[in-house]
Amino acid sequence: MQPAVEIKNLSVKIGEAKILHDFRVSLPVGKIIGLLGPSGAGKTTLMRVIVGRQKISGGNVSVLGQPAGAAILRSQVGYVTQAPSVYKDLSVAENLRYFAAMVGAPKSRVGEIIAQVGLKGHERQLAGSLSGGQLSRVSLAAALLGQPELLVLDEPTVGIDPLMRRDLWQRFRQLAEAGTTLIVSSHVMDEAAHCDELLLVRDGRLLAYDSQAKLLQKTGAKNVEDAFLKLVEGKQ
């Protein structure tokens, strides 16, 4: 089976700054991939490359067997940014009906997706009156309307209370079990427990790519944060 994402010798420069350095990784289908690292590690840039929104300086990136950013991928790749991408003067349902029309999804999907992301009862509420966590879930709902094969989520749990966070990870697991590949970024190392595979990055470089169990075994660490620190110290 071809990988969901194949990255070979990727480098990205923005101005004079090199953001990603010789990045190489192959990500499997139907898994939750945790993209972990501190702020400024290059996580968002890497995700923007994968969804075709960032110009690269070198290397090759293929997504679902196509060059990253190819027009054919628009209905196959969902992207949820850190900043909610919704119209605040429209209601939850109006936002999702609009995005459904954009991706050619049936109107019946709107109610189904609203229930899946835990916004039932908020259909008529203006997006601008929602909490930050609820806004994030509207953005997630919009990305799910087209039933993407790859879902890229940039720190989706930031600012969300523990109950909502638990519900989101349960939904992510359901999607992965149905065959969707998810790339979920976070600077919170504890969220590694929800992921099948971990991509650890720092200063635009790949530190490790492995399952949590294998990562802990290889480093002799008790948790992912300690493993990250050991890997950083080993590179210095």
Image: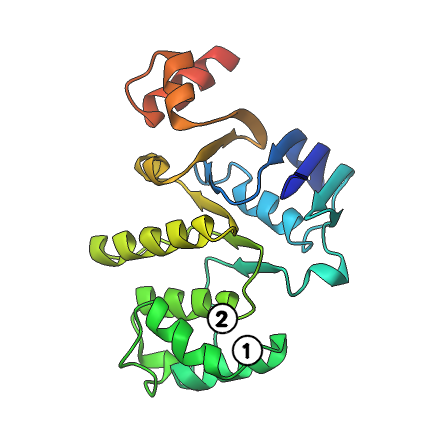
Residue 97 horizontal side relative to residue 222, left or right: right
Residue 91 locus on image (x, y percent): 39, 85
Labelled disc at residue 230: none
Q: Is residue 67 left or right of residue 153?
A: right
Q: In which quadrant is the N terminus drawn?
A: top right
The residue that appears at 76% across and 57% down in the rendered structure is 70
Image vertical order of residue 8 relative to residue 142, above or below: above
Task: Point out which mark residue 142 bears.
Answer: 2
Whole-percent x, y for residue 190 in the image: 30, 36
Ranked by sequence position, the earlier of labels 1 and 2 is 1
Q: Which residue is mark 1?
A: 99
Tell me which residue sits at (60%, 43%) in the image: 46
User: Within 10 Å of the Cα at label 1, are there few (<14), some (14-19), or many (20+) other Cα atoms?
Assistant: some
Quarter holding residue 101: bottom right
Do the residues bearing badges 1 and 2 touch, measured as CB atoms within 8 Å? yes
- The residue nearer to you, when weighing 27 against 82, is 27
Which amino acid, by three-letter code, is at mark 1? Phe
